[in-house]
Image: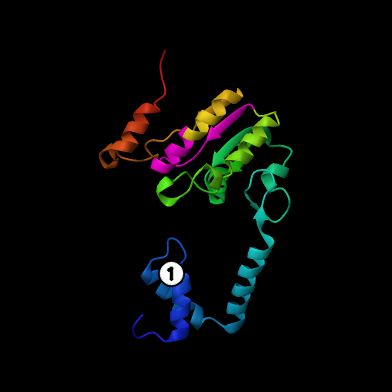
Amino acid sequence: MAGMIKPISNVYDQLRRLPGLGSKTALRLAYHVIDMDTADVERLAATLIAAKQQIHLCSRCFNFTDKDLCEVCADTQRDQGLICVVEEPQDVLAMERTRGYKGVYHVLHGVLSPLDGVGPHDLKIKELLQRLQQGGIREVILATNSDVEGEATATYLLQLLEPLHVIVSRIAHGLPVGGDLEYADEVTLAKALENRRRLSE
């Protein structure tokens, strides 16, 4: 970037590579890092390196963990017969925040996206099927996003799972709590209608 000295430009360039960081935010963070005490910068760098070295995938569900099994898989109080399939590790955190789900997870690490060259073999689909073949699973909840790739992935998984004699369900998508109809897009409204529930007999 013009007018920026090389060391700051290098920091800026690395921050810009992070998803969700726009140009202005990356620039602000770059200057903030340079303005930090050297000890704080060293602590930040050491923390990032340690996290990268210590964190790996859970041997069962493929969530991030620093042990062989993640906390959810290792919890004997969780319902091991109920698997919620999510796209990414951060989706596990989102589900856990609801405090209402008591089963376990399976993290795909992406979605099917032929345009991006992502096919079934690039995801943890084979590992999901292996878990089911071991027995003891009664229901699989497909909790992929409601975008085109997420829906395509859910449809593909449904076709694979139906012959395995387990219940396959899909999380409902629709209007958010407190949302106004006039501001909802047509896809959201269609999903809300599709996933409506009966209130009277």
Q: Quadrant of residue 133?
A: top right
> Where 178 falls versus 22 (above or below)?
above
> Where 129 falls versus 33 (above or below)?
above
Residue 59 percent location from the top left of the image: 70, 47
Comparing 87 with 199, the one in front is 87
Numbered label tally: 1
- Residue 147 visible to an observer of this rendering: no
Give the residue drawn at x 70%, y 28%.
135
Q: Is residue 190 left or right of residue 7?
A: left
> Where 61 falls versus 57 (above or below)?
above
Farthest top residue in view: 201
Residue 195 percent location from the top left of the image: 40, 28
Identify residue type, mark 1: Arg
Comparing 33 with 65, the one in front is 65
- Residue 34 visible to an observer of this rendering: yes
Q: Secondary structure at mark 1?
A: helix
Farthest left residue in view: 182
Residue 129 percent location from the top left of the image: 62, 35
Residue 171 percent location from the top left of the image: 48, 34
User: Where does the N terminus fall, quadrant-wise?
Assistant: bottom left
The magenta span reads 138-155
Mark 1 highlights which residue? 16
User: Where does the C terminus fall, quadrant-wise?
Assistant: top left
Mark 1 Cα within 10 Å, few/some/many (few <14, many 20+)?
some
Comparing 4 with 163, the one in front is 163
Q: Is residue 110 left or right of residue 129?
A: left
Give the residue drawn at x 42%, y 61%.
20
Q: How is the image coloured?
A: rainbow
152 inside magenta stretch: yes
Give the residue drawn at x 55%, y 48%.
109
